Image (cartoon, helix red, strand yellow):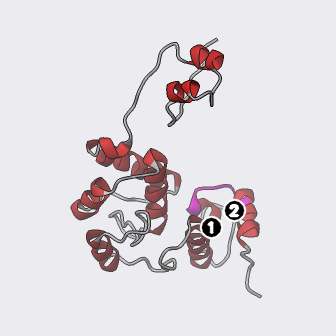
Amino acid sequence: MRLVAATNRDLAEMVAAREFRSDLYYRLNVFPITLPALRERPGDVGLLARHFVEKFARKLKRRIDAIPPETLAALEAYAWPGNVRELENVIERSVILSRGAELVVPPGALGGVTAAPIAQAAVAHAPAAPAPTGATLEEAERVHILGALRETKWVLGGPSGAAARLGMNRTTLQSKMKRLGIERPA
């Protein structure tokens, strides 16, 4: 049996400080692979951003063909303290909020810091139903679902219903609506 484990901690240092079991460390440390943090390899940001844009655009049945150069420059300049997961979350949120064929990263999405190029791009490509500035992913998801519901006149199922438009099952949409407190107006 093979096991792959990952951590952002220095386990050797933790073993020396008696904060991690040495027997477990030696069992896990058969073939260590050290990967530098995303902030140490800014050249990978563009490749990963494009990958995540394609992934989430396909999942949400959206068409996003480009990442504007100024947006890409701001993404590459950011330090990414949350590493690849933070980049993935920022791109997912941006795909949800983008309304055109270009990716729009909302102001404040990069750790609360508004990068001027991103702010300019957001103004130039403002979404039809904007989420509040500094919105959480949950708030952005709520705005996105409400937009799809309005566009489909609150039809949930079927090939032209909101669930199909959002790329999910009708039951998943109903569950999300319940969790987000979305109810059909009377």
Q: Is residue 41 visible?
A: yes
Instruction: Measuring from the top left, give residue 131's x and y in whole percent.
Output: 51, 77
The residue located at (74%, 80%) in the rendering is: 184
Q: Which of the pair 67/72 is nearer the observer?
A: 72
Amino acid type of the residue tagged 2 in the rendering: Leu
Whole-angstrom CA distance, mark 1 to mark 2, is 8 Å
The residue located at (53%, 17%) in the rendering is: 29
Instruction: Measuring from the top left, give residue 162's x and y in whole percent.
Output: 62, 67
Please give the label number shown on residue 53: none
Q: Is residue 168 magenta?
A: yes
| Region rendered in magenta | 165-170
Answer with left or right where residue 172 lies relative to residue 133.
right
Of the 4 image quadrants, the one containing the C terminus is bottom right
Could you say whether the residue bearing mark 1 is in a helix, strand or loop? helix
Crowd tier of the residue under label 2, counting other residues whose Cα lies within 10 Å: few below 14, some 14–19, many 20 or above: some
Q: Nearer the viewer, mark 1 or mark 2?
A: 2
- Residue furthest left as drawn: 69
Count of numbered circles on the image: 2
Please give the label number shown on residue 162: 1
Amino acid type of the residue tagged 1 in the rendering: Ala
Q: Based on the displayed image, in which of its 4 quarters is residue 95 positioned?
A: bottom left
Q: Are marks 1 and 2 in contact (CB under 8 Å)?
A: yes
Can you say whether 135 is above or below 70 in the image?
below
Instruction: Measuring from the top left, give residue 153's x and y in whole percent.
Output: 64, 79
Please give the label number shown on residue 173: 2
